Image (spheres, rainbow, N blue to C red):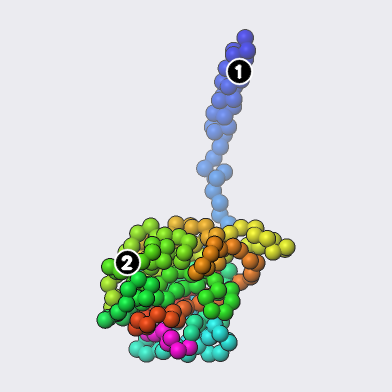
Amino acid sequence: MKYKLILTAMMAGSLFMAKAQEKAKPEDTEIWEPVPKVVTPGEHLGDAPSDAIVLFDGKNLDEWVQNSDGSPAKWDVADGILTVNKNYGNIETKKKFTNYQLHIEWREPDGLEGTGQGRGNSGIFLASIGKGDAGYELQVLDSYNNKTYVNGMAGSLYKQAIPLANPGRKNGEWQTYDVIWTAPVFNADGSLKSPAYATVFFNGVLVENHYELKGPTLYIGKPEYKAHGPSPIKLQAHGDKSKPLSFRNIWVREL
């Protein structure tokens, strides 16, 4: 008797759902507002779309300052290319960001010398939270036939996330990072509410898939979060002895 009652109830429920579906209309599941804003894409793949903030277009460093003291950025600009000047240290954006989409292109020089971490080393700090190398680093390095620890190769979130592939090109060729950055959120008491996430495409290949960071980058030790707000994007002037690398076509879309 018990099972007959259950079966009867299930049949009644199925009949109810069937009748509800008969009465439903396509319009019931159509959403018309709010209408997404119109964004004009770049003419070519990699060009800045109409709503992007252009951080470097080959002309000047008006959007950048020295990380050490906030003075105008002093790296070298020539022929539409930005080249690291290791004499002056890291540079960062004047503007602070929370969540964003970033496009940046970089190139290791021909005739590059050195091995491992001493070969074309730099970094893109997706959020700079202080002087020097404080922040969350996406590694830049020559990873074309250059052996190093895998959580420190190009495409890694340094010392945290190993890239899913190594699509690096050889020296002298331009490389591209496209990044989706979700900043961490903190409670009023400074405790972590939600962590940072990063998705990274390296030369069009997915190498970090919505990776959950454990905190800011640390060279030694395990990372942990400390509360901070919107932050600049920082480029690193690494102290290795190899020739400096270059950047171009840098833009960001706030999300």
Residue 159 shows in this picture: yes
Query: Label 1: which residue?
Result: 6
Residue 202 location in percent, x, y?
37, 65
Quarter of the figure with residue 128: bottom right
Asked whether residue 85 is drawn in magenta, I would say yes
Which residues fall within the magenta stretch?
81-88
Secondary structure character of the magenta stretch overall: loop
Residue 207 location in percent, x, y?
39, 60
Q: Of all residues shown, which one is farthest toward the right?
A: 189
In the picture, measured across the screen, residue 102 lies left or right of residue 97, that is left
- Nearer the observer, 46 or 75: 75
Quarter of the figure with residue 170: bottom left
Residue 74 location in percent, x, y?
47, 90
* Mark earlier in primary sequence (2, 1): 1
Q: Residue at x 72, y 63 (%)?
A: 188
Query: Label 2: which residue?
Result: 147
Q: Amino acid at mark 1?
A: Ile
